[in-house]
Image (cartoon, rainbow, N blue to C red):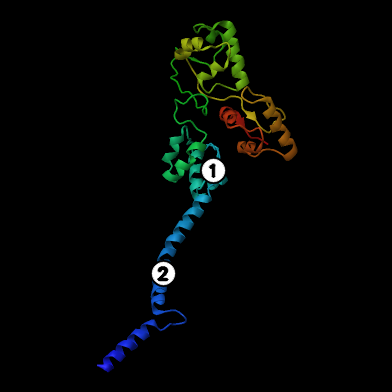
């Protein structure tokens, strides 16, 4: 009986003997905690890598039809993915509205959602004229007048136009470099809504731009380009050299997205 009691006391003592200053209970707890930590490390690594990949995307306003390979890389695509889009455009492809970008398999849904507010294209072809202009492809029915090539006599035959308004339309067309939308006639003070509604079903435009504006020119004049911004474009080029692309204008203090959405289709870059 005494021997049994002694053995029981020995077992209790062994259970509480410290190992390196820690009780066996402490060691068990430490082992459990270590295992949990090890199991969490891969998850933390995955989250860190995901966050790092997301933070590498640089969002900025862009027109997918004019992006360079560096633009696509900054927007989150690989060089190979960006080249596939450039190849699509080089073969005659284009993006008319934002959702057109979904047809590119390299543009993942999550990435497209991040781009949405920065894509300088209309949500749909019926978007207001404050959006990016798209050609108004009307039927070339001979009964309709193409306001991009119409003469004074052609326009004079339209309801409520007359010779005076016909001259104003042609003058404005020459200053613009071509009509992209028939709605641009509303820019003219002499064409109120009532007059436009009376002729809109009898006119169309082929959407062609026959006179572009080179931002590397010594002087810039366009109805959609404020004089102050035009002077700044010229002044900056004289100090720093020619622009390489339209997007270079973003660095200017007077840069305005609303202005650029209207004038960008008319701009080109030549040495």
Front label number (1 vs 2): 2
The vertical placement of 116 against 231, above or below, is below
Q: Residue furthest left?
A: 1
First of labels 1, 2 by sequence position = 2
Relative side of 56 to 124, left or right: right
How far across and how far down the image is residue 159, in percent?
A: 49, 6
**Split into 4 quadrants, where in the image is the N terminus?**
bottom left
226 with respect to 41 (left or right): right
User: At numbered mark 2, what does the secondary structure look like: helix, strand or loop?
Assistant: helix
Residue 148 shows in this picture: no
Quadrant of the rendering where the C terminus is positioned: top right
Most foreground residue, 8 or 58 = 8
Q: Quadrant of residue 24?
A: bottom left
Residue 7 shows in this picture = yes
In the image, residue 216 lies at what x, y percent? 68, 33
Q: Which residue in the protein does label 2 denote?
A: 33
Label 1 neighbour load within 10 Å: few <14, some 14-19, many 20+: some
Residue 235 percent location from the top left of the image: 73, 33
Q: Residues within 10 Å of mark 2 (few under 14, many from 20)?
A: few
Residue at the image position 44 percent from the left and 64 percent from the top: 41
Q: CA distance from mark 1 to mark 2?
A: 42 Å
Circle 1 residue: 59
Q: How many marks?
A: 2
């Amino acid at each position: 009986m005494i021997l049994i009691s002694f053995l029981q006391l020995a077992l209790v003592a062994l259970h509480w003997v410290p190992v390196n200053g820690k009780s066996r209970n402490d060691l068990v707890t430490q082992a459990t905690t270590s295992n949990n930590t090890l199991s969490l490390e891969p998850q933390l690594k995955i989250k860190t890598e995901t966050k790092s990949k997301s933070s590498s995307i640089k969002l900025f306003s862009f027109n997918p039809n004019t992006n360079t390979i560096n633009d696509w890389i900054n927007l989150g695509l690989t060089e190979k993915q960006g080249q596939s889009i450039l190849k699509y455009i080089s073969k005659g492809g284009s993006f008319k509205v934002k959702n057109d970008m979904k047809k590119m398999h390299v543009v993942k849904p999550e990435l497209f959602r991040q781009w949405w507010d920065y894509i300088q294209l209309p949500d749909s072809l019926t978007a207001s004229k404050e959006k990016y202009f798209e050609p108004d492809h009307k039927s070339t029915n001979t009964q309709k007048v193409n306001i991009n090539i119409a003469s004074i006599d052609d326009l004079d035959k339209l309801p409520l136009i007359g010779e005076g308004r016909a001259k104003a339309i042609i003058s404005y067309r020459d200053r613009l470099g071509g009509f992209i939308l028939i709605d641009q006639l509303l820019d003219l003070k002499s064409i109120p809504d009532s007059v436009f509604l009376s002729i809109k079903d009898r006119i169309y435009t082929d959407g062609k731009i026959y006179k572009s504006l080179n931002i590397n020119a010594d002087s810039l004049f366009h109805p959609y380009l404020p004089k102050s911004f035009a002077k700044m474009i010229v002044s900056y080029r004289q100090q720093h050299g020619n622009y390489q692309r339209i997007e270079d204008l973003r660095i200017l203090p007077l840069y305005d997205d609303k202005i650029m959405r209207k004038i960008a289709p008319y701009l080109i870059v030549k040495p």
